[in-house]
Amino acid sequence: MAQPVAQPAEPELGEPQFALHAVVEPIFIVGIMIGSCYVNRLRGYSIRPPKNQDQGLLGRSKRESRDDEDSSDEAYDGQVSLSLLPDSSATTKRPTKKRNCCGAVLDMPDTSRYANYWHSRFIQKFPFLVEMFYWVVNLLFYVGIKQISELIFATEGVWKTAEKHGIAVLWFEQDGPFSFLFPLREVDVQMFFRTDHQTMLTILNRAYSMIHIPVTVSFLAWYYYAAPTHEQFASARRMMQLTNLFSFLVFTSFPCMPPRLLPEEYGFFDTVRREDAESIYATNKFFNQLAAFPSLHFGYSFCIGTVLFYHSGIFRRRLAPREKRMSKFRQIFFVVLSIIYPAFVLTIIVSTANHYWLDALAATGVVAMAWLCNRVLLGLLPLEDIFLWCVRLNKPIATTGNRVF
């Protein structure tokens, strides 16, 4: 078993998070989302529908009221010439489109006939809203999985179970057959910063929450703009979403206590969450305290690093359509950033006793599996079609790749 570690009575833990993080963090995230909606807007496109298409959310257009046999929308009002926008001149009563799902071909509602409805035009003007919706669904799924996990382990007590799993992880790293993969103990890393580098520990403490959700949202906002094609962006987004889903399933079946919550004799200290200076995402409502394995912090950072490395194009002979070869300086910049960022996150999560080495290794495997399987999520498109049909909404054409500077 992992051996307890003796610690001084009054350890030096550096400075904790700023208490204002609980206010600044959500404001920063909302600001990034609003800014991204504006930067990625469809320029030259009017939200106002044509005069003969005065339309509410679930109501019927004047044309539909006049002639139920022709449920098509009028053509776009001509304020913009955009060949990417859907053709709203179809005349069938209930137009359909083909979807391939699990080897079957399905006839799904074609919502392009709702393209001139005011809410469709609003989202077409700001298509990044669709990405925000996807991540709201992710958050709801996470909260649901957390509740299920608590129900599954209610008999024995999820806290006790998670503690056993955390100690088992330490044993695997220190005394298991693969201990050679983990030459440094987490407690030694934390002690290194506590004893000789407290200023750096303060920086790590205060960076812990600010690099997770805020940087991830910032990355998605930037890559939506910077990716050469929307398919390339969507592949990265699906990889991150599947990383979420796979991790949530592991959290449910294998709750794991982070080092900072283990009994004191193991020598770990909670250097981040003191004096009630928690991130808003570290509260019981949004945050599962017993979800150390695998590390979503490192999983997200590894996803971002992987995408940045690919985006550099440094080892790619063929580029995506509309993609231009970067200068050597920019290629090296993206490659270095793709390595430094995950390494920095790994240093943070271990030195603050929020994760084990094995958590990061498991997260790497989860990300690899998510990348290989990311097209599985395309099987949910029929459900999206039904939802869009129910709310009479046409899915917008993404503006990814239409950079103006």
Image (spheres, rainbow, N blue to C red):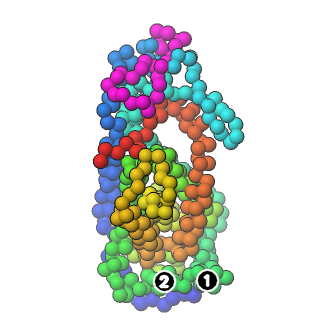
Residue located beneath label 2 in the image: 187
Q: Residue at x 51, y 32 (%)?
A: 388
Kindly report which numbered mark, 2 or 1, lies closer to the viewer in this rendering: 1
SS assignment at label 1:
helix
Q: Residue at x 34, y 58 (%)?
A: 25
Examine the image and state in which quarter residue 69 appears: top right
Q: Is residue 252 left or right of residue 119?
A: right
Residue 179 got which mark?
A: 1
Do callouts 2 and 1 mark residues in contact (Cβ within 8 Å)?
Answer: no
Is residue 14 part of the magenta span, yes or no? no
Q: In which quarter of the image is the N terminus?
A: bottom right
Which sits earlier in the primary sequence, circle 2 or circle 1?
Answer: 1
Q: Main secondary structure of the magenta part?
A: loop
Q: What stretch is highlighted in magenta?
A: 64-89
| Residue 39 percent coordinates (x, y) | 32, 44
Q: Which amino acid does label 2 sit on?
A: Val
Query: Foreground: 141 or 344?
Result: 344
Count of picture labels: 2
Q: Can residue 76 be seen in this view?
A: yes
| Residue 317 percent coordinates (x, y) | 50, 58
Query: Foreground: 363 or 137?
Result: 363
Q: Residue lying furthest top in this view?
A: 66
Is residue 79 part of the magenta span, yes or no? yes
